[in-house]
Image: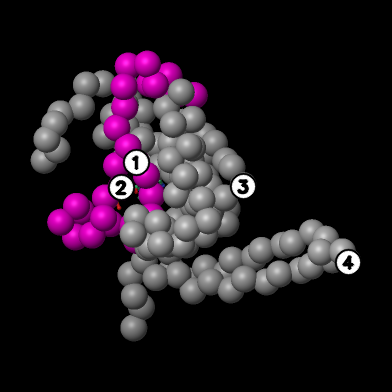
Amino acid sequence: MVRRGFAVTATIYVVGPLGGPTVKIFRVADCLFCGIAAGDIPATRVLESPRTIAFRDISPQAPVHVLVIPKEHHQNLAAVAEAGDGLLDEIAAQAALVASDTGVAETGYRVVFNTGDHAGQAVHHVHAHVLGGRPLDWPPG
Ligand code: AMP
Ligand code: ZN
């Protein structure tokens, strides 16, 4: 049985003398965003940091609609928060950087982590939607 959004990952560490360079390789089974992170699936990247990638949503819901993901697979917000080590901070910082780089920081923008069925989470690799460039309704539908 294939579990939707579940990624099989293998991490290989290559450590040189004196604790030298470390290489991490993720093998991906069936996660779309792991595929984008690995460069196997094309995406329009707008920003990258050591542990995150930001790319344009394929079906934009606003003039600016960018997704920020960790390169490492975590299913949702709770999982990435639990992982700790500052990764969630890095995602939030990248979302703020996307907003300033795309020119919506001044006018305002929304950062959304859809989580679970009621929120309509379709891709089970945590992602922050950064939406802006037009007035956004509240409450959301
Ligand atoms: P969510 O419903 O919060 O899981 O959001 C998933 C988002 O991923 C949706 O807004 C989709 O439009 C977007 N998406 C799906 N496939 C791709 C892709 N190949 N490249 C970029 N965005 C995608
Ligand atoms: Zn993944």
* Location of mark 4 (residue): 17
First-in-chain label (2 vs 1): 2
Measure how far apart labels 1 and 4 are at the Cα level: 41 Å
Circle 2 Cα neighbour tier, 10 Å, few/some/many (<14 / 14–19 / ≥20): some
First-in-chain label (3 vs 1): 3
Q: Would you say residue 116 sits in the magenta stretch?
A: yes
Q: Would you say residue 93 sits in the magenta stretch?
A: no
In the drawing, what numbered circle is on residue 113? 2
Answer yes or no: do the residues labelled 2 and 1 have beta carbons within 8 Å? yes
First-in-chain label (1 vs 4): 4
Q: Mark 1 belongs to which amino acid?
A: His
* Location of mark 1 (residue): 129
The answer, for residue 1, to whether it is visible in the render is yes
Region of the chain picked out in magenta, as a range: 101-129
Quick check: is the Cβ at mark 1 less than 8 Å away from ligand 1? yes
Q: Mark 3 belongs to which amino acid?
A: Pro
Residue depth check, mark 3 versus mark 4: number of the one nearer the observer: 4
Query: 85 or 63: nearer the eye?
Result: 85
